[in-house]
Image: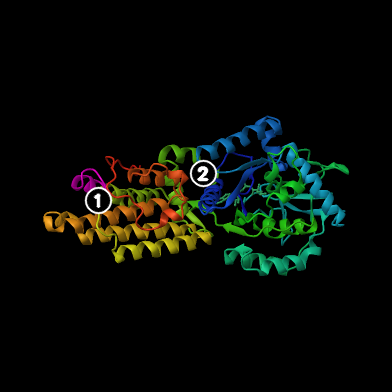
Amino acid sequence: MTFIITTPLYYVNDKPHLGSLYTTIICDSIARYKRLRGEKVIFITGVDEHGLKIQRTALKNGVSPKEHCDKISGIFKNNWIEWDISFNKFIRTTSQEHKKVVYEFYEKVKASNDIYMGEQKGWYCVGCEEFKDNPDNSPSYKCPIHKKNLEWKNETNLFFRLSKYQGAIEELIQDPEFIEPKERRNEIINFVSKGLKDFSISRTNLDWGIRVPDNSNHTFYVWFDALLGYISAISSDDKNISLDLSIKSGWPANLHIIGKDILRFHAIYWPAMLISAGIKPPKKILGHGFLTREGQKMGKSLGNVLDPEILLNKYGKESVRWYLLKDISLGSDGDFQDRRFVDIINNDLANTIGNLLNRTTSMSRKWFNNQTPSISEKNDNEIITLANNSIKNYLNYLDNYKIDKASNEILNFATNVNLYLNKKEPWVLIKDDNNINEVKLIIYNVLEATRIIGTLIKPILPEFSNKILKQLGENDISNKDWEESLKWGLLPESIKLQQPIPIINKLDYE
Ligand code: MSP
C-alpha cells in the first residue's frame, strides 16, 4: 500500500514563512512515521506559481513572472532540504508535465458536461485568489484574512458545475474521518448546507496561467490548476507522465494537510472536481490552525514575521520542530513565544531527556567499566509497564495524527523514568557491595527506557533520536525494524559506552 501525504503547494509570492514551515514539518513527521511503520510513502510538496497574485508580485519586483517563480521556487526547495524535510516529490505548477495533466483532467470534466460559459461578477481577494461572499456589497469590504480591499470583477468565464455535486459532497462529508478536526468539519457541513454554487475556473485578462485549450483568451483559474499538482506530482519524474499514470501509481491521496483558510477548496471544490472526472476523492483532509507571534497576527506591515532561516540558524531545526509539534495542538491555533520556546527546549529536551541520558550513561561508565551493566534478570514490572503503556499510547496517537499528544507521551514517559531513577537512588545503593545486582538492574532499566525514548522520538526529531541511540551504542540506526526495536530488553549488556556529550545545547533567552 502506498501512503500519499501532501503539504499545500505554496504560493511563490514570497519565500517560506513560519506558517508554511509549520505545515511542512507536520507532514514530514507523519511521512517519517509511516515509513517507520513499513509503508511506502509518497510525500508531496511543491509550489503554486500561477495567478494574479504572483503576476503582480513579479511586476512589482521588476522581473518576469517566470524569473520570479524560478527564484522563489528554488528558495522553497532549498529551504526544505536545509530543514531535512523528507519529501519525495516537489512539484512546480509551471512545469510542462503539470500542464499536460491539467489538460487531460479538463477534458474529462468537460466530457462529464460540467463546464459552461457564464458571467462572473463579484468581489475578489487577490491574496486568497478567491471570490468572497460580500454581505453588504460595499466596495470598502475587506478580506477578513488579508485585511485588504477586495476588487470588483465582472468577466465572462468558464464555470464548473459544482451545484451538481451537492449530494455527493454531502455524502462525503458525513464520514467523520474525511475532515478533521471536528470544528473544521462542522464549518464545512454548515457551508454545504446553504447550497453549493457553480464556480468559475477560467480568467480573461490574466496572462500568467495555463491557457485553456479551446478558449485561448482564457487561462485556468489558479486553484483549478494548482489542486491538480497533487496528482501530477505523483508521476512527475516519469517521462511518460500522465493523469492516468499518476492515478495508477497510488491515487487517492491518503492525507492532505492544510491550514484552515483553504479548507473549502480541499474539502468541497477538489473532491467535486475529481468526482466529475471519474477520479476518487482524497481520503482525509486535516486542517491545522493558524500561528500567531506573541499573541499577534504575523504580517509584513507589523514587522513581526518569523523567518524560518533565522530560526534555523539561531535555534537549530530539532528545537523548532519540537516546539511546533509538541506545543501546538494540531488543529488549534497556536502562538509562537520566544520565552516559552526557550523554556520548553531547555526543560523537555535538555533537562528531562538529555540529562537523563547523560547522568545515567555517566553512572554506568563509572561503575561498570565504561559499559552497560550485565544483569541476571531483566524483570522489573514497574518500568516495563510504564514503557509498554507509553508505546501503546504513542502509536495510537500517531495513527490518529495527534502529534502533540504523541510528543507529550514521550515526555511523560521520560519524566516518569526520571522519577524512577530518583526514587531508586542507585548512587546511595552503590555504596554497599551487597546492592550491586540491584544497581545494575536499575541502571540497565533506565538506559533501556532511554533507548525506547530515543526510538519513539525518531519521526518527530530524527537527528536527536540518532544522537540518543548512538550514545547508547547503536550504530546501524537507520536499517532497523523500528517496531521490533520498541520491544523491551534489546539494549545489549556489557557494550562500550562513549563519553557522554550533551545531545542538545541549552538555549539562552535574549
Ligand atoms: N497556494 C495555496 C495552496 C494551494 S494547494 C493546491 C495557498 N498557499 S499559501 O502559501 O498561501 O498557504 C499555504 C499554507 O500556509 C496554507 O495552508 C495556510 O493556511 C498556511 N499558513 C499561512 N499562514 C499561516 C499561519 N500564520 N499559520 C499557520 N499556517 C498558515 O494557500
Question: Residue at the location (58% across, 66% down)?
Answer: 183
Question: What's the mark number on residue 373?
Answer: 1
Say if the magenta span includes residue 367.
yes
Question: Residue at the location (23% across, 48% down)?
Answer: 364
- Precedes in sequence: disc 1 or disc 2: 2
**Mark 1 and mark 2 residues within 8 Å of each other at the beta carbon:** no
In the structure shown, which secondary structural element does the residue marked by tag 2 occupy?
Answer: loop
Indicate the quadrant where residue 112 lies. Answer: bottom right
**Image spot of residue 133 (x, y percent):** 72, 59
Question: What's the mark number on residue 305?
Answer: 2
**Image spot of residue 99 (x, y percent):** 76, 41
Which residue is farthest front? 376
Does 24 sit left or right of 496 as displayed? right
- The three-letter code of the residue at mark 1 reads Pro
Identify the main secondary structure in magenta.
helix
Q: Is mark 1 within 8 Å of ligand 1?
A: no
- The three-letter code of the residue at mark 2 reads Val
Does 315 appear above or below 6?
above
Residue 293 is at least partly visible in this image: yes
Of circles 1 and 2, which is in front? 1
Name the quarter where the N terminus is drawn: bottom right
Name the quarter where the C terminus is drawn: top left
Does 33 sit left or right of 420 as displayed? right
**Image spot of residue 167 (x, y percent):** 76, 68
Judge by depth and name the residue closer to the eye, 43 or 305: 43
Q: Which stretch appears magenta?
A: 360-372
In the structure shown, which secondary structural element does the residue marked by tag 1 occupy?
Answer: loop
Judge by depth and name the residue closer to the eye, 381 or 43: 381
**Image spot of residue 429 (x, y percent):** 15, 57
Judge by depth and name the residue closer to the eye, 393 or 333: 393
